[in-house]
């Protein structure tokens, strides 16, 4: 369009304009142009990829935690979260979030821009958590809402190739 080239892929309904699906992020791609010949092009994500979680929590006198949570997803994290929501459905997605923390209840669960892939995906809700107790101390993990990796990507003793994260 004009002097700007866009890489497009229509294999997923969760992919915004000019964003390639994660499996296509392999650093370079081959352009096959019948008029100008073929050439290599860098495949680098141009948009921000952000998972932003804001939790405003209060410890109550009953040793419970209550509060409001706002989660915002942009770029590839938004694509993955949208896929998960559509796959599970809103109610089961909420239940999966409740399972991330010991004894958690989520209420007033709301999702914005689920079907508008050009916009940020936002989830807002209130929650009630009964934290784990150890003696007279309460424990609430700082990662109580999200675990970013299921397993350590740096576990090999000898590495002969880079760890591929796909996007920043």
Image (cartoon, rainbow, N blue to C red):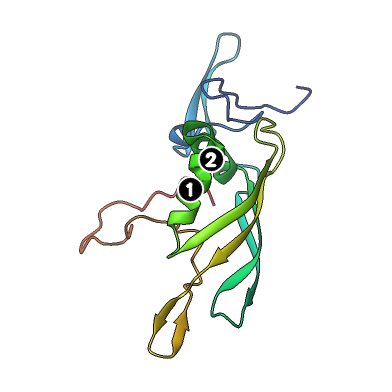
Is residue 124 visible to the viewer in this orientation of the structure?
yes
In depth, the one of 69 and 118 nearer the eye is: 69
Secondary structure beneath dot 1 equals helix
Q: Residue at x 48, y 55 (%)?
A: 98
Q: Is residue 160 left or right of residue 34?
A: left
Image position of 135 (left or right of 76): left
Crowding around mark 1 (Cα neighbors within 10 Å: few <14, some 14 to 19, many 20+) is: some
Above or below residue 51? Residue 65 is below
Residue 2 shown left or right of residue 42 in the figure? right
Residue in the image at 66% along x and 30% along y = 115
Percent x, y of residue 37? 54, 15
What residue would you read off at disc 1? Answer: 95
Q: Are marks 2 and 1 in contact (CB under 8 Å)?
A: yes
Residue, x 56% and y 80% (percent of image)? 62
Residue 91: which disc? 2
Q: Position of residue 33 (x, y in %)?
A: 56, 14
The count of marks equals: 2
Seen as rendered, the residue at the extreme left is: 157
């Amino acid at each position: 369009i004009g002097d700007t080239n866009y890489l497009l892929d229509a294999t997923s309904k969760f992919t915004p304009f000019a964003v390639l699906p994660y499996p296509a992020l392999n650093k370079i791609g081959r352009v096959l142009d019948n008029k100008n010949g073929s050439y290599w092009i860098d495949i680098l994500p141009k948009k921000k990829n952000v998972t932003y979680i804001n939790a405003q929590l209060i410890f109550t006198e009953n040793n419970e935690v209550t509060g409001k949570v706002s989660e915002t997803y942009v770029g590839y994290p938004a694509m993955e979260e949208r896929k998960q929501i559509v796959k599970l459905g809103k109610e089961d997605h909420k239940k999966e979030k409740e399972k991330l923390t010991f004894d958690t209840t989520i209420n007033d669960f709301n999702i914005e821009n689920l079907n508008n892939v050009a916009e940020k995906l936002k989830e807002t809700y209130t929650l009630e958590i009964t934290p784990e107790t150890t003696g007279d101390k309460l424990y609430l993990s700082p990662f109580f809402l999200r675990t970013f990796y299921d397993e350590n990507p740096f576990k090999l003793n000898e590495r002969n190739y880079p760890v591929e994260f796909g996007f920043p």
